């Protein structure tokens, strides 16, 4: 399974990468939404874990652009965020998000969300 981790925080990207790789995932990283759009256009991913608040292009704009341009239509999108407002969640779902993971999160929380999205753990 292949995952794209999109976050402006190097620490968060490394943490998520280490947890996913421990579960058998192959991971690629992007620092912002614009970089992620380019990576998705050039590759194939099963899931994208994307932060909401990033410079250059935030997570909502990134998801909206990818869905509008039909980049990776089968790829699942998990918003990784501190945003819990109902209007935000509604908008993210309208733009094409599939699931939400609230920061801070645990390995168990990440695993549970992946299972909800239909991904079985390899380990």
Image (cartoon, rainbow, N blue to C red):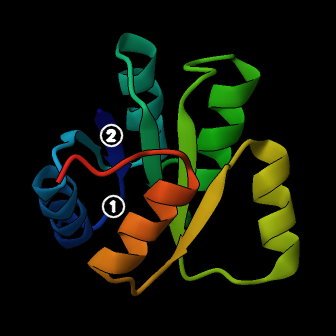
Residue at 37% across, 66% down: 111
How many residues crowd mark 1 within 10 Å: few (<14), some (14–19), many (20+)? many
117 or 70, which lies in front? 117
Provide the residue designation for mark 1. Answer: 8
Q: Residue 2 is drawn in which quadrant?
A: top left
- In this view, 60 is above or below 46: below
Q: Which mark is residue 80?
A: none
Task: From the top left corner, tell me how far across and down residue 14 is, in percent.
Answer: 15, 62
Looking at the image, is mark 2 or mark 1 earlier in the sequence?
Answer: 2
Q: Residue at x 31, y 50 (%)?
A: 31
Q: Nearer the viewer, residue 43 or 116?
A: 116
The picture quadrant where one finds residue 25 is top left
The image shows residue 110 at horizontal and vertical percentages of: 38, 69
Query: How far is mark 2 from mark 1, CA to CA?
Result: 16 Å
Above or below, 15 relative to 67: below
Residue positioned most to the top? 42
Give the image quarter of residue 69: top right
In what element is the residue under mark 2? strand
The residue at the point 79 percent across, 70 percent down is 88
Q: Is residue 54 left or right of residue 98?
A: left
């Amino acid at each position: 399974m292949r995952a794209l981790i999109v976050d402006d925080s190097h620490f968060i990207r490394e943490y998520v990468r280490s947890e996913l790789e421990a579960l058998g995932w192959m991971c690629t990283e992007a620092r912002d939404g614009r970089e992620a759009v380019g990576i998705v256009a050039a590759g194939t991913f099963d899931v994208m874990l994307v932060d909401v608040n990033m410079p250059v292009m935030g997570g909502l704009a990134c998801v909206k652009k990818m869905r509008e341009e039909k980049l990776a239509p089968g790829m699942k999108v998990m918003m990784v965020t501190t945003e819990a407002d109902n209007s935000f969640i509604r908008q993210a779902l309208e733009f094409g998000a599939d699931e939400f993971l609230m920061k801070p999160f645990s390995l168990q929380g990440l695993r549970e969300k992946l299972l909800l999205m239909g991904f079985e753990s390899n380990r």
